[in-house]
Amino acid sequence: MRDADNIRAVETLGIDWMGFIFWPGSSRFVSDVPTYLPQHVSRVGVFVDSTEEEIIQHIQLFGLHGVQLHGHESPAFCRSLKTACGDSISLIKAFSIATAKDLEGTKPYEGLVDYFLFDTRSPLPGGSGRQFDWAILQDYNGSTPFLLSGGIGPEDALRVRSFHHPRCIGIDLNSRFESAPAHKDVTRLSHFLQSLNNQTL
């Protein structure tokens, strides 16, 4: 997100985290600090193969509470970044999932990051708007909690509510709730969250 008014509106919906994408290849790229940053939700920066120095600069500039790594960052890189940032920053490592075999890639990162994010495999990092088969995640038996991502849309509230895994701690909502890149449709998002909480179906 990057529009101040849109940030304010989404912040009121009871969400937990809000993402800011710092990969220049994305149509949602945030080049400047918005005139308003959320005060009541955690700010998460999304990076793709950035240097440790670049990430720390953005943490300081945007007052980030979390860092999501969406590239080819190695376990050694994650260990170094976590050491540099300390416990005040939550570290999330994203994995592209198409088959159960892809879950094997999480094992070297156990104990090095706070959360995994499971997204749909696509040619570019994130934002494909497509879903993968969530049944694959029943084969995940790691100890790291994860976020469910990948093409979750307004019509998926019942499906999300029906998904159960002891390590799933949340969902990632992005492109299917946008009226334009980096601009959320607040009405659509609000209705989905109400449906997800079983208030309207």
Image (cartoon, rainbow, N blue to C red):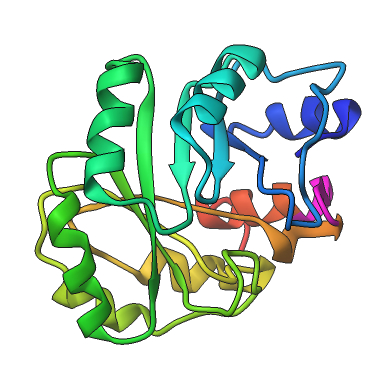
- What residue is rendered at 34% in x and 69% in y? 163
- Judge from the rendering whether residue 106 lies leftward or rightward of residue 116; answer left or right: left
In this view of the protein, which residue sits in the foreground, 176 or 200? 176
- Judge from the rendering whether residue 56 lies leftward or rightward of residue 124; answer left or right: left
Magenta part of the chain: 181-188
In this view, 107 is above or below 24: below
- What residue is rendered at 61% in x and 71% in y? 124
- What residue is rendered at 50% in x and 70% in y? 158
Q: How many labels sit on residues?
A: 0
**How far across and how far down the image is residue 70, in percent?**
48, 54
**How far across and how far down the image is residue 166, in percent?**
17, 56
In this view, 99 is above or below 121: below
**How far across and how far down the image is residue 152, in percent?**
58, 68
Q: Is residue 152 in sight in this rendering?
A: yes
In this view, 185 is above or below 17: below
Rendering quarter of residue 63: top right
- What residue is rendered at 40% in x and 59% in y? 72
